Image (cartoon, rainbow, N blue to C red):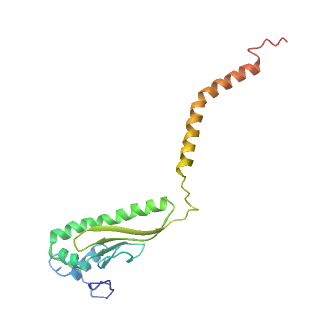
Amino acid sequence: MGMRIDSSYNNYPVNRSTQTDTTRKTANDELSYLQDKFKDYSFVAANFRQGMRYGSNATTNVAISPQFLKKMANDPKLAEEYEKEIANMKSCDQWCRANISARGDKLVADGWAIDKDGGISRWSIGTHDDRTARVKSPTEYANELYEKKKSAKAKPYLKKFNAMSQKLSKGFFFSGKA
């Protein structure tokens, strides 16, 4: 199902047909073409604003300004350049999601926005649970490093002390006469 292009975010069904480079002339044509080309992406024609959510966590979500879609539809070189950028968004999403999970955080939503001038930005919304990923304070970390260095310096002396203790306990230094 395609999207009709308006100045605000709306979801109106339109007829989708396979678009070729020669038939794409409108923003709606360009959006349909991108949806056909990138099956595992979710596209929306909208002027992105803070707090706007679209798509799902299962797809790479891209909001493209209707004005920029029209520019892409009428400029094949520009469209080709941005299709390469859009193709890279999926791997960037995977990398970001892996990093968010590695920190113990949870991703709520994320996506990309291409503004009317072609500027690309990424957004994400996540949650953090302090109980699952406790970060050390700088003081705790410094104390831990100090203890490690202190124990590393003491190891050679500790070996010598242990060797001496064994010799003493075996009576090498004492004749045993009182």
Q: Quadrant of the C terminus?
A: top right
Q: Where is residue 170 shown, x and y percent of the image?
A: 76, 19
Relative depth, front residue between 150 and 55: 150
User: Residue placed at 74% from the left, 14% from the top?
Assistant: 173
Give the position of the N terminus as an image quadrant. bottom left
Q: Is residue 172 above or below residue 17?
A: above
Quadrant position of residue 61? bottom left
Image-based side of 62 in relation to 125, left or right: left
Residue at 54% across, 44% down: 142
How far across and down, in percent of the image, does residue 56 sit? 41, 75
* Front residue of 173 and 88: 173
Q: Quadrant of residue 18?
A: bottom left
Q: Is residue 142 above or below residue 128?
A: above
Expressed as whole percent of the image width and height from the top left, the position of residue 139 reads 55, 48
Residue 30 vs residue 120, the one in the foreground = 120
Q: Quadrant of residue 113?
A: bottom left
Numbered disc total: 0
Residue at the limit of the structure toward the right, as seen here: 178
Q: Residue at x 34, y 67 (%)?
A: 122
Residue 10, horizontal then vertical, whole percent: 32, 86
Q: Is residue 172 above or below residue 54?
A: above
Residue 178 left/right relative to 97 = right
Q: Determine whether, in the image, residue 78 is placed left or right of residue 4.
A: left
